[in-house]
Amino acid sequence: MKTINLFFTSLCLLVAGCVSYHSPDHALWPQYLRGASFDDMTETARVAKRPVYLGAGGRTIAQIAHDNKLEYGDKISNDTTMAVSYMADLEFALYDALRKPGISVQRAGTDVVVILVRDAIMELNVADISNDGADTLKTISKILNKYDATFVEIAGYTDATRDAHAAAALSTDMAMRTAVFLSQHNVIPQRLFIVGRGAARPIAAQDDIGRLTNRRVEIRVSPAR
């Protein structure tokens, strides 16, 4: 009997592991993204969002500094030292876990940016996250939940082959779809800034290969101060 139970348990786990991920219905997205901001993650926006973020249980770099007994010395210096160290650890964790084609991890000042080429995380001809993309975003979610004293901007981009309205709509869908996934995996939406930038800020030429790179989602992580 015990052997049969173990067999069915293993079978259920196997089946569960093979189930494809599908984004929730669009009508449910506002529930997952309640508390998220739909604009650029500027310094002013982060300051304005701070009370909402803290009210949802968010932490700041100053709290981590206090937890690590950095009560003495200049507060700004302590916060800066902790932020640099904290973000360096986050960068390494992301870089070490995301060694896959179409994905890169970069440093931008204190921030860390994960660039996800669309084909690396989404279905080829369908507006939904692929199985490989779900695995990647689960990994990112776990790391973001570990390094939770951060704000997160999720920005969608397209290539320049669509008109401006279509590009804006598609890039926003990509960003929101990614944000919903992160919210489903315990990244609190009060940390999130979500924006669709259309064909703005290309990172490659607008040829056949470059366009594949320009269709992307960028996840920018900034220390919460």
Image (cartoon, grey):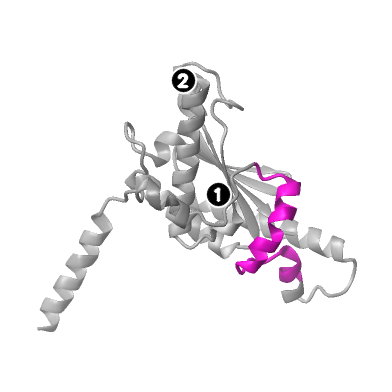
Residue type at mark 2: give it. Answer: Arg
Count all numbered tags in the image, as a single digit: 2
Q: Is residue 62 a member of the stretch shown in magenta? A: yes
Between residue 84 and residue 25, name the one nearer to us: 25
* Rendered position, 205 above or below 83: above
* Rendered position, 124 above or below 131: above
Q: Which residues are magenta?
A: 40-65
Our reading of the magenta stretch's main secondary structure is: helix
Does 138 sit left or right of 77 as displayed? left
Does 122 sit left or right of 66 as displayed? left
> Dot 2: within a 10 Å radius of its alpha carbon, few (fewer than 14), some, or many (20 or more) residues?
few
Identity of the residue drawn at 32% across and 31% down: 125
Residue type at mark 1: give it. Answer: Tyr
Q: Are marks 2 and 1 in contact (CB under 8 Å)?
A: no
Name the quadrant containing residue 50.
bottom right
Secondary element at image label 1: helix
Does 2 sit left or right of 33 as displayed? left
Which label lies toward us, 2 or 1?
2
The answer for how far apart the CA atoms under marks 2 and 1 are is 32 Å
Identity of the residue drawn at 43% across and 55% down: 138
Secondary element at image label 2: loop
The residue carrying mark 2 is 162
> Where does residue 86 sit, x and y in percent of width and height?
68, 60
Does 108 sit left or right of 134 as displayed? right
Outermost residue, bottom side: 1
Identity of the residue drawn at 54% across and 29% down: 198
The residue carrying mark 1 is 95
